[in-house]
Each structure stands twice: as structure tokens, then as C-alpha cells.
Image: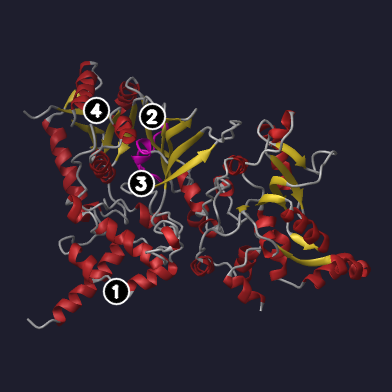
Amino acid sequence: MLSPTYFLPKERFPDFLNALKSLGQVFAPVKVSKQSYSFKAVEKASEIAFEALRTILPPKKFFYPQSETLVKFEDGEIKECIEEPVFKVIFGVHPCDLAGLGIMDTIFEDSPGDTHYLRKRRTSMIIGLSCMPDKHCFCQSMGTDCPEKGYDVFLTDIEDGYFIEGKSSQGQKLLADAFADKVLERAREAHKDRYKRFWLDRSEAFETGFKVDNLRSTMDLEWENPVWEELGDRCLSCGNCTPVCPTCYCFDLVDVAALSSKQDGSGDAERRREWDSCQFVGFAKVAGDYNFRPGPVDRLKFWYRHKLHGFDDAYGFKTCVGCGRCTVSCPSGIDDIVKVVNILQVARQEKDEGQPK
Amino acid sequence: MSAAAGSGTNHLPTIAVEGLTGCAGELLVILENLDKLLPFVRVVRFPFAQSKNEGGAVDITFVEGSVSQKHDLEKLKRIRANTRWLVAVGNCAVWGCVQKGALCKCKAAEMIEAVYGSAASSIAAEAMDAAPLDSHVAVDVKLSGCPINASQFLAVTASLLRDHLPYIVSKPVCLECKLRENPCVLIEDNLPCLGPVTAAGCGALCPSMGAACYGCFGPCEEPQIGAMTTILKEKGYEMEEVLGRLTAFGAVIPMGEKWQK
């Protein structure tokens, strides 16, 4: 049975926000500088930046925080830190970020499952919101332009209101309750027509992208393409491309000792998990100081491959969701994935055409 | 950790805090946090903070400042001979700071002449080219900062008190900046931010206030100076300003050396 769809007139949005607030703390994109947005706690609809396309950090930060204490060493015992998560509602998540959350879920749910991530993720509600692409959006190329998983409720902006779909059972319950409270109406045929037109218009609105069908072979066969050296020469190894990525999850574990007066030298300390980046020189350094990705070019190439091909064999999907955050967050302008893929594909095509049949 | 026989606080590990040529900023940070250390250590020498100071060997000595005068070097050698762990604290002790950075622009003799005039010759007889501690003695732990970060200082001390050499990473400031979700001042405001090539530890203090990082913690591990220079030049900064910023805090970097010649 198809679940019911709803219509929310924009003037009634504050009531819908109140319904969300009754579930838990609501977070939404907020403008933080002349061109940047960030998911922050909001109380009023006027604080929300509905126009935000991409926040500096993706919503992964709510479930996989930048720094998190995993265990504490106290009185000679190891105590796992499992906090009771507070219910969070994340509003205004676009399709690329929903895909990103779906990928993070798959990775963190994989056996044995990451308790710290999953507990927080399972006490949350994700409210998706439609968007129109800008010149850096290429979710269409990555096949992540339509909401599929990683969310509970999705709102499509149809001018004077929102067309609303529920995905999960907790999402459908929220909508049924809001309908009972007369915040939502049932979607009518006219709303459905405008909904269909929106998604057709949106699919025509993409300005940039590439064909994904030969991406796998291109990434393998163009491993020695001279473009990598050009990019490597400009790479700062600042690591900005990875914290901003909706699917980068690499971390460092650090033991932080606290001062202790114990005579035997034992005492309190904690083990923290902090976001790390494959772009840092120390990331691939192993015992004996050997580094199997010593130069910026080695690390950058690794990252590109990881995003565009690395997960094909293990999981059957690509971990790039086409949000364009890396492109806009790179001070050197070398994380333009679309531009780089186009260069590689053209090089591949030229070689293919030069081959005898 | 060695424990001297005795009563009262005498069983506690011993520390000393000493200063060479510097602004005493590190000594202040240590003084401000001394109450947290006092239950765990006995402060044998800290001339900046106490009038009663003893001689003899200690477990840990924290040394601030660069070696810029002959008596700095004599003092440093005495310190090294009398301590188990030698911790260089602050940019001066780890990299040489501005007094060494200035040597990228002119010779020490020219600076002394300009500052001291007719008294220059007697000053020059005592002066040395400013250098970090490890140019002269073996240093066990390097904790940079201008000033140092208090929580890093306490964690380093806690590790040493357990006989562990602390693990100090030199990832770039950009990491701390992104973790705080700051808008990038290098991208959005075209400021000459040195975050990509500077060691983190400050919590991205300046960029969090909308200002460019000026590199006071010294370089991160393998800073990409070539790329940094290229990007700042593309933003319209003159080579002289870029190199001046890169070398201001004393770090020896290939571009700085080239520029000096």
C-alpha cells in the first residue's frame, strides 16, 4: 500500500517546526558567513536558511562527531563510554546528503557495527528537503539526485508549499499526527502535478557532470595520467576535502593521559576518536617510518580513487555523492571532481580511438 | 619515575621551569596551570615564579626561549646535564621564533647595530644567532606554540610522569578549523592564511575569529610550501610578503633559505 502524501502551506511551516520540536532538538542549515552555512540548533523558522545548498560540514557530524571519547581508563579498569543519546531532528537535508547518510549507515552497520554511531543514528529523525543544483552539483552523475534512503520524511518545495512524503514508520507517524493536528493537508492532484513538474525541471537544471558508466576502468587505466602530477604540485595537503565529505569516516585514535598521583604510575586517561585525513603525511606512515603514500600526489590520487572506484568491489557503490563540497572547500581548486573526471575520460577516449579494431 | 627518599612532598617527581631568550609567555602558561600540577610534582626550580630554588638533578625540565646569548647556551648545557627529560616549550625553544625569523631578513650584526648604536660592540660580544634548543642539545619533547596550549602542556606532563614519551602530532591548522566548522578565510576572504602549512594545537584560534593564521606554532609535518606560495601569489600577494610571513616564526623552510641567499 502506498503511504499517504501531504501538503504543507508555507505559512503553516512554523506549526510544522513546532511538531518537529516536540520530538527533540531541531537542527537546520543556518547562514554563518557570506557564502557558508552550517547545521545548527534552531528554535524559530526565521533562523533556517532554506536556500542553503551545502553546509560546511555534512550531517554526519551528528552521528560521528569530530571528537568522541570511546573508553576511559579509571582505577585500573577500562570503561566503555556509551552515552544516552538525545533525540535529534535534522531538518533540510538534501538528496546528496541523504545518500551520504545512507552510505555511512551501511559502513557503520557492517559487522560488528559501530555502537557509538548507531546509537546516535537510531535516536534521530532526518527531514529531507528538495533543492535546485548550482554549478558545482553533480549528484545526477553519481545517481544520488533523488532521495532513496537515509531519511524519514522528505519535503519537495512546490512554490506556495511543500509536498511531503513519509519514508520510515517514525516519519509516517510524525506526518499522521501533524495531519490529525491540522498542520498538514492531504496532497491533492494539483500538488502532485506540481511535484512531478518540479522533479522534471530539476533533472534538466544540472549544469555539470559526467558519464559514470566507464568511471571504474577510467580510474584504473588513467592512474598514470599526467594530470595527477599537476594536481599534486598544487595540493596543500591541508585535508579540507575529507572532513567536508559526507562519506569520509577515517579517524585517529589518541590516548590522552590525565594527571595522577597514583604511586604505581597507573591512573586516569581516555581514548578519543578524532576525524583524521588521508591527505596528511602521517596517515599512511607505518612502523619504521615507511610511508606508502609519501607525496601529496599519492595521497590525492588515493582519495580520488577511493571516492570514485574504491568501494565498487567491496560494496558495489561509489562513495562520492556529488555534493560539490570538496570542490568549494579546496583552497587550491584541485578537488574539482567533474573537471578531473572529464580530463581522464577524454584521455581514455583518445587512447581507445587510437587502438586498432 | 624516580622518587627521592624523604618525607613530605619529597617522594614526588621533581620538575624545573627555566627561561632563555623569550617573552616568558610559556612561563606564564605554566604558572597559570601550576595548581593542577602541584599535587603530583615538586617544583625544584622555577625562578620566574618562586624565590627559593634548589640545585641538583630533576626529572623534568621545561625550557622556554631560544638560545640567543652565550649565557643562554651555558645555562642550557647545565639544564641538560641535570634533567632526565628536557621539554622545549613554545615556539622560541622549538623553532627559534621571531628572533630567528629576523635572521632570514638581515644579519644579526646589522640588527644589533640598528638597535643598540654605539653600545653594539659589547652586546655583539655576548650575542649568538638565535637558534632553537635542539641546535645545541638533545631535546626529548618539543611542544610548540606561541604561547603553548595549556591542555597540551598538562597532557604532555601527565605522559612523562608515567614514563611515556607523549605523542604530539603536527597536523595542519586546517583540520582544527574544519572541525570547528569555520568558514575558510583563505577561500572566502582571500586572507593570507597559513593554516594549511602550520601545525595545529591552538584550536584554529585566529581563523575562528576571522583572521588569517600567521603560523605561530611553526610548520606542520612536511608543509607544502611550494603550493602555499603558488596559491598566495595567485591571490595577489607579493612574493616578499608571502616569504616574510612564512619565515616570521623562525622555521627553517627551503623557500626561506633560498630567499636569504
Q: Residue furthest top?
A: A181
- Distance from Cα at disc 3 to Cα at disc 1: 31 Å
Instruction: Please rate how many residues cluster around mark 2, counting C-alpha atoms within 10 Å: few if below 14, some from 14 to 19, many from 20.
Output: some
Same-chain status of marks 3 and 4: yes
Quadrant of the rendering where the C terminus of chain A is positioned = bottom left
Mark 3 falls on what kind of element? loop
Instruction: Name the residue that disc number 3 marks.
Output: A54
What is the CA distance from the residue labelled 1 to the residue labelled 4?
Answer: 51 Å
On whether residue A47 falls in the magenta region, the answer is: yes
Q: x, y (%) of residue B154? A: 61, 40
Task: Please give the range of residues in magenta.
Answer: A45-64
Asked if badge 3 and badge 2 are on a common chain, one would say yes
Which of the two discs, 4 and 2, labels the residue nearer the N terminus? 4
Q: Earlier in the sequence, mark 3 or mark 1?
A: 3
Judged left or right of residue B86, residue A11 is left
Chain ID at mark 1: A
Q: Pick the residue in front: A53 or A100.
A: A100
Mark 2, residue position: A45
Q: In which image quadrant can residue A103 be found?
A: top left
Q: Quadrant of the N terminus of chain A?
A: top left
Q: In the image, which disc is placed on residue A71?
A: none
Q: Residue at x 53, y 55 (%)?
A: B195
Q: The residue marked by circle 2 belongs to what chain? A: A
Letter of the chain that mark 4 sits on in the rendering? A
> Going from the N terminus, do you reach mark 2 or mark 1 first?
2
